[in-house]
């Protein structure tokens, strides 16, 4: 159960970071700074990917321990 809780907390943290960087990307685009927007988007996508990995880890954990 502890592993599942930690996976959820880490996934949430990565989702929050992804949202923050997507908001920054939008702001940079509005300001015409497209290079910075691109950088923020790449960082956001990285956090989204890491969140997805934590969700997958949790699903695997549940599958293995549901027997």
Image: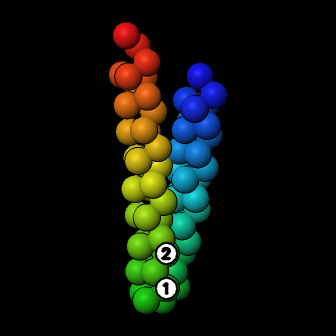
Question: For mark 1, what is the residue?
Answer: 36
Choose between 58 and 11: the one closer to the eye.
58
Horizontally, residue 10 falls left or right of residue 65, namely right
Disc 2 vs disc 1: Cβ atoms closer than 8 Å? Answer: yes
Furthest toward the top, the residue is: 67
Choose between 45 and 9: the one closer to the eye.
9
Q: Residue at x 37, y 31 (%)?
A: 60
Q: Residue at x 37, y 10 (%)?
A: 67
Choose between 10 and 57: the one closer to the eye.
57
Residue neighbourhood size for the residue with mark 1, other residues' Cα within 10 Å, grouped as few (<14), some (14–19), many (≥20): some
Horizontally, residue 19 falls left or right of residue 6, namely left
Question: For mark 2, what is the residue?
Answer: 40
Report the quarter where the N terminus lies.
top right
Instruction: Give the distance between the C-alpha atoms of the residues marked 2 and 1, in whole angstroms.
Output: 6 Å
Residue 34's spot in the image, x, y percent? 42, 86
Residue 24's spot in the image, x, y percent? 55, 71
Secondary structure under badge 1?
helix
Choose between 28 and 60: the one closer to the eye.
60
């Amino acid at each position: 159960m502890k592993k599942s809780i930690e996976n959820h907390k880490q996934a949430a943290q990565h989702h929050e970071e992804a949202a923050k960087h997507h908001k920054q990307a939008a702001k940079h685009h509005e300001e015409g700074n497209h290079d910075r927007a691109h950088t923020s988007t790449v960082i956001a996508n990285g956090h989204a990917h890491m969140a997805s990995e934590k969700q997958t880890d949790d699903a695997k954990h549940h599958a293995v321990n549901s027997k």
